[in-house]
């Protein structure tokens, strides 16, 4: 059995100034040959890592094409997208006779003048392989799922955890289902229910109420005739017609049953629409709620400058609050500022310099903060994640610096990335577990490596390109809660 695989992955914010180039799609892992894709991602917690595991277990030949994985940013131009898509299609053509296709996608890719990137990719692959070759794709939990995506794929499987620690297991599930189609004659029928709702920040799957939503999904998956099902909480930073949460269910050759269960779960989720939202404080407001006897460390998660949502990563609201509060044993992970890093590199470890930190990508991100700092450590930015999210994957933050002004430590980086765990910080001599106050440029993924030892966590809002005052929608195809009163 010969299965071709490829990845074109991008979570696209239509509000960020961060551009997406062709190089962006290869910045994370580099341009990998097919053999390198297998070698680099075997045993790694990514969807393709799960595909590889499935190939090993089921004994099929996995034929890699491309691994194009851009970090969240703005819409790519059409010429960039077309070139990458052609790489995938050419790889499929060159594979010869195949029995199926496994794709790693995201579910919220927006291209210049093309709102539904994944729908277009799946249509192009379907046109190439024909109606009888099964196509199975793995999606992020933050997908804006379209009818075209559902129509063009045989099976879509979304992640069930946030933080997304189940990437390899969901990839393995895709491989398992594909094998059932080919070897056992499974005839999947898939239905979509688009919920008129934008999901809020209450979506961490280890906690209520999201925990109960996943339990309800699993209850439906256990029913006779159901192959698999997924909840997509949506990606809320894309002004596109298909923005919104959704449910998609796959059954064994019963389209009406798939639609019935998708509609039922969609209604269950919408009925609880207010439960998925909570009011976010600023860092200053959240700091004022902390009692002196509260368990430390306290983590402040800047949702609006989450680089994992496409933000620039250099907003200064949180840093300004930390400085004005004269915090001790405090750190911020990370501020993206290549200019400041270069100044630190020139001065060297141990030097004391005055540097303007952050606020350089957009006036909306706040003003640069003048700091007189000691340079504690410097790095080329290379490290390896120790998980559970992206466990085993090599990371590269680019040239980086650990600076300190009195009791406040800041990690300056050149590449945008969330702190999924403490591995990178430790390469610069900073153990966040020894801090009392931690600021992270992340919404929830940091929880995978931080929550087990944190004293308290506050999701906060700070001025930036993605705060509520700068995000408005004009292209939605339907009314959406809570934008509309539904």
Image (spheres, helix red, strand yellow):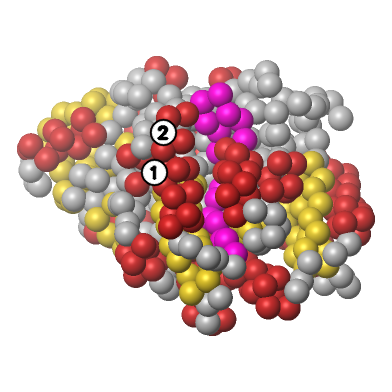
Q: Does the magenta stretch mainly form a helix, a strand or a loop? A: loop
User: Is 416 on the left-hand or right-hand side of 275?
Assistant: left
Please state the extent of the stretch shown in magenta in the rendering: 100-116
Give the residue number, with chain letter if any, for mark 1. 25
The reply to whether the magenta stretch includes residue 168 is: no
Q: Residue at x 46, y 62 (%)?
A: 95
Return the x and y of residue 458 as percentages of the image width and height.
56, 45
Whole-angstrom CA distance, mark 2 to mark 1, is 10 Å
User: Is 20 on the left-hand or right-hand side of 150?
Assistant: left
Asked if one can make out residue 53 in the rendered structure from this viewpoint, the answer is: no
Q: Quadrant of the C terminus?
A: top right
Instruction: Report the front residue among 72 and 379.
Output: 72
Q: Where is 146 relative to 463, above or below?
A: below
The reply to whether the magenta stretch includes residue 113 is: yes
Numbered badge on residue 80: 2
Q: Quadrant of residue 362?
A: top left
Q: Residue at x 56, y 24 (%)?
A: 113
Q: Quadrant of the N terminus?
A: bottom right
Q: Residue at x 84, y 26 (%)?
A: 485
Return the x and y of residue 475 as percentages of the image width and height.
68, 21
Asked if one can make out residue 183 in the rendered structure from this viewpoint, the answer is: yes
């Amino acid at each position: 059995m010969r299965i071709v695989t490829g990845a074109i992955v991008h979570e696209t914010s239509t509000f960020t100034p961060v551009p997406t180039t062709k190089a962006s799609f290869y910045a994370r892992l580099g341009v990998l040959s097919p053999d390198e894709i297998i070698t680099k991602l075997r045993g790694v917690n990514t969807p393709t890592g799960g595909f590889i595991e499935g190939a090993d277990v089921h004994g099929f030949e996995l034929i890699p094409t491309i691994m194009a994985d851009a970090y969240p940013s703005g819409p790519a131009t059409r010429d960039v997208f077309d070139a990458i898509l052609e790489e995938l299609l050419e790889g499929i053509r060159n594979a010869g006779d195949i029995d199926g296709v496994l794709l790693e996608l995201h579910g919220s890719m927006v291209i210049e003048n093309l709102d539904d990137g994944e729908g277009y990719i799946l249509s192009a692959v379907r046109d190439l392989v024909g109606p009888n070759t099964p196509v199975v794709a793995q999606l992020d939990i933050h997908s804006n799922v379209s009818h075209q995506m559902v129509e063009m794929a045989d099976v879509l499987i979304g992640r069930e955890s946030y933080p997304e620690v189940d990437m390899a297991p969901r990839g393995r599930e895709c491989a398992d289902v594909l094998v059932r189609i080919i070897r056992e004659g499974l005839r999947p029928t898939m239905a979509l229910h688009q919920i008129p709702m934008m999901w809020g920040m209450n979506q961490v799957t280890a906690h209520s109420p999201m925990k109960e939503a996943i339990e309800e999904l699993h209850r439906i998956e256990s029913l006779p005739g159901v192959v698999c099902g997924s909840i997509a909480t949506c990606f809320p930073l894309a002004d596109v017609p298909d923005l919104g949460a959704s449910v998609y269910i796959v059954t064994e050759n019963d389209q009406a049953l798939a639609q019935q269960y998708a509609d039922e779960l969609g209604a269950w989720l919408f009925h609880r629409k207010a439960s998925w939202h909570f009011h976010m404080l600023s860092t200053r407001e959240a700091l004022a709620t902390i009692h002196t006897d509260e368990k430390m460390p306290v983590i402040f998660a800047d949702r609006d400058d989450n680089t994992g949502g496409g933000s620039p990563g250099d907003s200064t609201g949180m840093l300004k609050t930390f400085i004005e509060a004269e915090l001790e044993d405090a750190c911020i992970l990370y501020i993206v500022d290549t200019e400041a890093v270069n100044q630190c590199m020139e001065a060297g470890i141990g030097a004391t310099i005055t540097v303007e930190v952050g606020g350089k990508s957009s006036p909306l991100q706040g003003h640069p903060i003048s700091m007189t700092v000691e340079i504690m450590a410097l790095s080329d930015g290379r490290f390896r994640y120790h998980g559970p999210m992206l466990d085993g994957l090599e990371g590269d933050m680019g040239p980086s610096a650990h600076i300190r002004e009195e009791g406040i430590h800041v990690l300056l980086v050149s590449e945008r990335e969330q702190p999924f765990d403490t591995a990178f910080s430790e390469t610069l001599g900073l153990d966040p577990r020894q801090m009392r106050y931690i600021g992270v440029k992340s919404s929830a993924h940091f929880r995978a490596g931080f929550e087990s030892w944190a004293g308290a966590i506050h999701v906060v809002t700070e001025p930036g390109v993605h705060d509520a005052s700068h995000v408005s929608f004009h292209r939605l195809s339907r009314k959406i809660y809570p934008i509309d009163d539904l």
